[in-house]
Amino acid sequence: MSFDYDLFVIGGGSGGVRAARIAASEHGAKVALAEEYRMGGTCVIRGCVPKKLMVFASSFPAAIAEAQAYGWDAQIGGFDWTAFRGKLDAELDRLEKIYRAGLNGANVTVYDTRATIKDAHTVCLASGEEVTAKHILVATGGRPFVPEFDGCEHVLTSNDIFKMESLPKSVLIVGGGYIACEFACVLNGLGVEVTLMNCSPLLRGFDAGARDLVVAQMEASGIKIVTGIVLDKVEKTDDGFAVHGSDLRDAQFGAVIYATGRIPLTEGLGLEDAGVTLNRNGSVKVDEWSQTNIPSIYAVGDVTDRINLTPVAIREGHAFSDTVFGGNPRHFDHEMVASAVFTQPEFASCGITEEQAQEQGGAEIYCSAFKPMRSSFAGAQDRVLMKLVVDKSSRRVLGCHIVAPEAGEMIQMVAIAMKMGATKEQFDATCAVHPTMAEELVTMRKPSRSY
Ligand code: NDP
């Protein structure tokens, strides 16, 4: 049977674009890709990239305060959100063009339209046109989840933050994960009064000691944190929004942002019609090769809800193309994937937490918390934390948790050693770089706790 394409990719985000480019340019496949919105997906258009630029923008007031403490006669003026947003839009346009050029350069046919699946080898475009492909890759990502409640239509999500006309004076952020905590710090840094509300403790699932330090410093920086409250109503008022919930009556905010998780974008995609099995939360069920139960249909990235991070989607997409089109069967190993939460202070992790180590036993914890030289000199009370979880018998470093400025940059390096199976003794045999914060990672002599 002949097909229009060897591969049809649905979704032009990190995973889909990588898979399409590798299949076409490195393995000579005839590839098409459909994207209904903007090329680049969540990461580029409304996620990691604009978020990180906002993190940079929000860091200047603290930097100026520190400069003053170091003797500079420095003053910060007001923040021009409109000017920043204009530059942000231009940057995203530039990146989108690069993604598009990459696909064009690889001879991938791009359809700027929504595509759905008709059957194991057929894709329907919004125009009504049908195209066939030997393989279909679903890389549609996810979208923010907002629970149903009275007035939920008034709340914003992370998608809307980058498009706000002006910054509100005050904001209520609901949620306690990566997105809620990152935006709480960003908006606080930009001068917005931030209240962060979650049912359970913030950053649940992360190493508790590290998480507690991040939360304490977020509070010290002026973010009001409320836990244990369930919000049940949001009303629009003349000046903003009134919110109601348990122990909360008529509290007023300039904006309400929900960051209560993301859900896979599989609705209306035709997957069930094609016989593809979905997980209970709607994500596409795949095996380690990213293959669904229908052999010609694969899925990568957030739509599969494995580890929802851009670099993971990219690796999954690349491995898929090498396997299916490159004669090089390999799958992405989801062990020891490092990540960073871009809060203030930054928080980065790789491997298991102290709580997981305690549960499984046979582990030592090496931990150091201290005032870093730079902010300590400026009179700040900030503390940083470095923690290693070490397997007692193999001596392998199984977990690393860092709370510190540039923790994301540090964990990238540590993750290489951890992925190679480095032991605590190999960490210690590595000479320290002095004076740095990260030198603590190779100088912690005695375990703080043992399980
Ligand atoms: P998360 O799943 O990380 O967190 C969701 C939060 O919302 C949890 O604190 C949860 O509370 C809370 N929550 C869930 N339902 C409700 C509800 N009905 N009412 C109130 N609170 C609720 O989701 P995010 O949206 O923060 O992030 C989504 C994904 O995006 C993450 O999995 C992450 O992988 C990725 N991401 C990664 C980033 C990075 O690498 N820096 C940055 C941003 C996103 P509870 O703890 O009680 O469940």
Image (tube, helix red, strand yellow):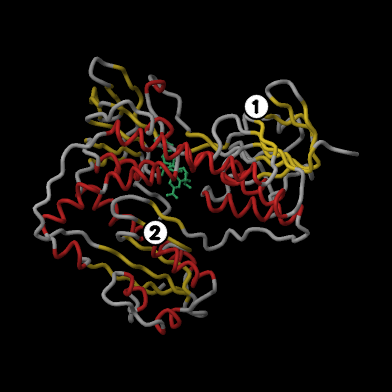
Q: Is residue 7 left or right of residue 159?
A: right
C-alpha span from label 1 to label 2 = 37 Å
- Judged from this view, the residue extending furthest toward the top is 238
For discs 1 and 2, the disc positioned in front in the rendered view: 2
Q: Quadrant of the C terminus?
A: bottom left
Which one is in front, 294 or 318? 318
In the image, residue 356 above or below residue 324? below
Please name the residue that numbered disc 2 is placed on. Answer: 408
Q: Is residue 107 left or right of residue 220?
A: right
Does dot 1 land on a helix, a strand or a loop?
loop
Q: Quadrant of the N terminus?
A: top right
Which one is in front, 53 or 175? 53
Q: Residue at x 37, y 21 (%)?
A: 154
From the top left corner, tell me how far across and down residue 377 is, in percent: 14, 65
Please name the residue that numbered disc 1 is placed on. Answer: 268
In the image, residue 148 above or below residue 357? above
Q: Is residue 287 left or right of residue 440?
A: right
Which one is in front, 79 or 199? 79
In the image, residue 165 above or below residue 422? above
Q: Residue at x 70, y 26 (%)?
A: 125
Is the residue marked by circle 1 packed among few (<14), some (14-19), or many (20+) residues within 10 Å? few
Inspect the image, locate mark 1, and give the three-letter code of the amino acid beneath it. Gly
Does dot 2 land on a helix, a strand or a loop?
helix
